Amino acid sequence: MRGLHRRSMQVADFDFDLPDDRIALRPAEPRDSARFLVVEPGRDFQDLKVSDLPGLLRAGDLLVLNNTRVIPARLKGQRWRGESRIGAEATLHKRLGPCRWSAFMRPGKRLAPDDRIALGPDLDLMATLVSKGEGGEVILDFDLSGVELDLAVAARGDMPLPPYIAAKRGEDARDRSDYQTVYAAHDGSVAAPTAGLHFTPDLLRRLTEAGITTTFVTLHVGAGTFLPVKVDDLADHVMHAEYGEVTEATATLVNEARARGGRIICVGTTSLRLVESAADEAGLLHPFAAETAIFITPGYRFRATDALMTNFHLPKSTLFMLVCALAGTETMRRAYDHAIRDGYRFYSYGDGSLLWRAEP
């Protein structure tokens, strides 16, 4: 973990009261009509719309977006053991090889190595459960491999909506498009980079016309993003790892923009975590292709990020800790109090914010 912490921080330090009805179940229509809270040091909060973004930036600024594509990773089916059949559900989590996936499965207590798993409406996508870890995580070896497996999953799976939405309604055909950015390009995520859901082709066009550059990184979001922090002391938390790539072309664009005085605005916490992972002590980006488990909490010294466009996050989450690190804990507490009082919608399908970095 980068950054110096003057005292041991507790998960409870990042708790707040969030009314249940503030969690959005559907996105705004059109996407860029979502509300947009601008948080800037030394200024009052601004209540705007995402469509106002071009006027908040200046020519020469650079937006960094995550172009990962969400795969329909939730698969219903059965566990087969001899003549025994029980209902089961797998959410693919991380690809480990051409035919091997790590997955979260239910019912965890009724699964064992060598079980056969039949998935899909017709129970025709077969896998063998290789091993079982804690918390329902398993490793599956599928009978299909490579592109054949990808196509089979795409045809049979459902979009893996966040548990906070899935607990209130089922996935439907709208989610196939709603839970995907308009610029998604590379399959691999089991959760959307949700700040990017606010962008429309028209908004991207207006940003370009305003002299604001966009570039892309790829970080495949894993199901670990939904896991609660289970420790009291943040020093004991082990951050989940996710695979990300920063190309040489993107690193060059970021470095050239900074050299010209342009500001780097990361769209989403995934883009920010990847940019900070690829940056050196001087703030220069380098090509990157590896897993990152960077855990950003107050006290972290940001290397290359000037601002973050992000949605509103849940209490005691690592994402709320990250925004507190960027804009200041007390500032973010006031911002979230304002958002809750004023009816902003939270989480994946919710409203957005633009957070400018506070000076250390």
Image (cartoon, rainbow, N blue to C red):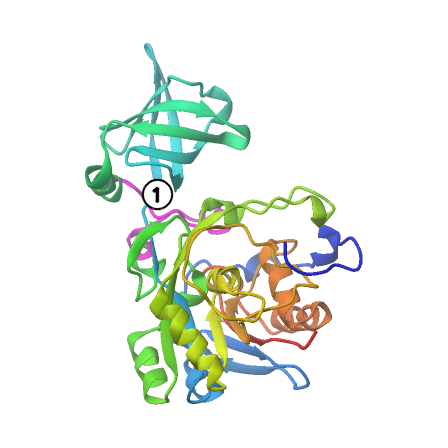
Question: How many numbered tags mark residues here?
Answer: 1
Residue 108 on image: x %, y %: 49, 26
User: Residue 356: where, in percent of width, then height?
Assistant: 58, 77
Question: Which quadrant does the C terminus fall into?
Answer: bottom right
299 up-or-down from 72: above or below: below
Task: Give residue 336's quadrant in the image.
Answer: bottom right
Of residues 156 and 130, the one nearer the viewer is: 130
The quarter of the image holding the N terminus is bottom right
* Left or right, 215 with reference to 240: left
Q: Is residue 322 left or right of residue 298?
A: left
Give, as a single range, the part of the protein colored magenta.
156-175
Q: Residues within 10 Å of mark 1 (few under 14, many from 20)?
A: many
Look at the image and tell me whether residue 341 can be seen: yes
> Which amino acid, mark 1?
Ala
- Identified at 25% across, 33% down, the residue is 121
Residue 221 percent coordinates (x, y): 43, 52
Query: Which residue corresponds to the image point at 58% horizontal and 58% vertical from the top-left?
Result: 319
Looking at the picture, tell me which residue is in the foreground, 231 or 29: 231
Residue projecting furthest to the top: 82
Asked if residue 320 lies in the magenta stretch, the reply is: no
Residue 42 against residue 99 in the figure, above or below: below
Asked whether 16 or 6 is in front, the reply is 6
Q: Give yes or no for residue 171 being in the magenta stretch.
A: yes
Which residue corresponds to mark 1?
73
